Image (cartoon, grey):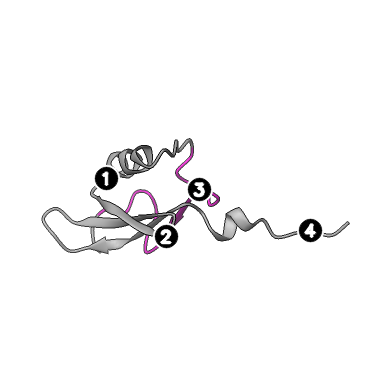
Amino acid sequence: MTDSVNPDLANPRITVLPVQPGHPPFRVVEIDGEVAGAATSMTDLLLLAADAGITVHDLEDPAVVRWVGGGKLTWRRH
């Protein structure tokens, strides 16, 4: 039996892009390849997901969320 690549891991529905400058700083959130909005916190991210009909149980699950330029605790530029 061979291992197959799980396509869900390669293409999670939610992508959170790097922190952008602003007051407050924010991260652009894409859902299903489309810009869903800007998030300034995990709460904003969860609300954007809920608006798209996605319930997120684990923000660290790579099959659900792809974090670019920092993880779930990165909401300010370094």
Residue that mark 3 sits on: 64
Q: Is residue 44 left or right of residue 72?
A: left
Residue that mark 1 sits on: 41
Q: Residue furthest left?
A: 23
The disc, 3 or 1, on the residue closer to the chain's N-terminal end is 1
Dot in front, 2 or 4 = 2
Dot in front, 3 or 2 = 2
Task: Give percent across and percent down for residue 18.
Answer: 32, 63
Crowding at dot 3, Cα within 10 Å, few <14 / some 14-19 / many 20+, comes out as many
- Label 4, label 1: how far apart the Cα atoms are: 37 Å
Q: Secondary structure at mark 2?
A: loop
In magenta, the rendered stretch is 58-75
Q: Is residue 40 left or right of residue 17?
A: left
- Label 2, label 4: how far apart the Cα atoms are: 27 Å
Residue beneath the point at 45% across and 38% down: 56
Taking the magenta stretch, the answer to whether it contains residue 42 is no
Residue beneath the point at 53% across and 52% down: 62
- Residue type marked 3: Val
- Label 3, label 2: how far apart the Cα atoms are: 13 Å
Q: Nearer the viewer, residue 26 or 32?
A: 32
Residue that mark 4 sits on: 3
- Residue type marked 1: Ser
- Residue type marked 4: Asp
Residue beneath the point at 27% across and 42% down: 44
Crowding at dot 4, Cα within 10 Å, few <14 / some 14-19 / many 20+, comes out as few
- Residue type marked 2: Gly
Q: Secondary structure at mark 1?
A: loop
Q: Secondary structure at mark 3?
A: loop
Task: Give percent across and percent down for residue 32.
Answer: 44, 55
Secondary structure mostly seen in the magenta stretch: loop
Q: Mark on residue 33?
A: 2
